[in-house]
Amino acid sequence: MKVVTFGEIMLRLKTPENLRIMQSDGFEASYGGAEANVAVSLAMFEDKCAFVSKVPNNPVGMSALSAVRHYGVNTDYLVRGGERLGIYFFEKGSNIRSTNVVYDRAYSAFSQSDVEDYKWKDILEPGDIFYFSGVTPAASDSVCQSLKNALKYCKEKGIQVVCDLNYRGKMWAKEQAQVVMRDLMQYVDVCIANDEDFEATLGIHAFDGDLSTGIDQIDTYKEGMLEITRQFPNVKSVTSVLRNIRTVEDGEWMGIYYVDGTFYESPIHTVHSLEAVGAGDAYGAAFVHGLINGFDPQKTVDFAISASVLKLMIQHDFNVVTEDDVFKIMNSKSTNLSR
């Protein structure tokens, strides 16, 4: 059994020392992207995983491939071709100044990939888990169709599907996202929904948009999670990250998990973060790790949020931590935890 993630990996260019993009005359280069991030986390946890994507057959594309392979991710199904690797520019905020991301991913090798590029019958096997996020179908119509082909194959073969709704307003409008994602939800078994994802992708209210009071809105989150299972009865469980964000660096984080008619809540972690990019992907990967390793529901959500807040202390997209690293945070009795 393996976890297969499908999505785009990009070149990440970050400004140094909290500079704004317009101020910087140089950038730090690394690689990342939602599904690549999840695959690396799972490999770090020593789970068997494969990342499926398309990168250009040039030194930049090969470097991106090597970045995930370095951590033990299977890249045998990664397609080579196309003209360019997508890029995102990352400008880290500070205090009251928000972090900013600028995408340069149009006409990337992944977005221009064809449905024929992905031989799902050769990639997916019964017993596997298929993982995708809402970023993937937003990449292009052809990628969306490739994803749907994968999901149909999963349903045919009884392969479990995990979806992180993961809405990105810089990639598509809410109206388009809702049409696409509501259609894809018929194939989903486990749903990860955070903050604006509920309404932006499914038209389900759960959050009023005020990140300073996310945890305080836990009751409406729970109602939103229940509504997902009502509207999409194939969804067996839903999980969410809730946050009270004070500044770019400071806030409280917790996870909740609904399964088998019961809600499970993690402790609240009070954190001062180094970098917030990839924390949601870290949560999703750790959550899947809990599922495939037989953690009980409480242990699963506690482990997932612990991995997520640990990612806040790690630069670049990948959450390069082991299972033991996460357990140390999860089992800590330090004062930054509360029930």
Image (tube, rainbow, N blue to C red):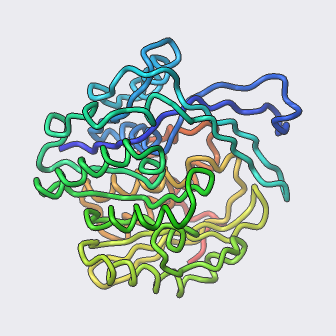
Q: Position of residue 320 (x, y in %)?
A: 50, 37
Residue drawn at the location 55% of the way across and 31% of the way down: 86
Which residue lies at the image location 60% right of the left edge and 32% below the top edge? 87
Residue 76 as seen in the image, left or right of residue 326: left
Q: Quadrant of the C terminus?
A: bottom right
Q: Quadrant of the N terminus?
A: top left
Residue 16 placement (x, y as % from top left):
79, 31
The quarter of the displayed image where residue 206 is located: bottom right
Q: Classify residue 63 as left or right of residue 25.
A: left
For residue 201, side relative to residue 69 (left or right): right
> Looking at the image, is 183 positioned above or below residue 17?
below
Q: Residue furthest right?
A: 23
Residue 40 versus residue 309 in the image, above or below: above
The answer to which of 186 and 72 lies nearer the viewer is 186
| Relative image position of residue 331 (x, y in whole percent) | 48, 60
Viewer-nearest residue: 44 or 187: 187
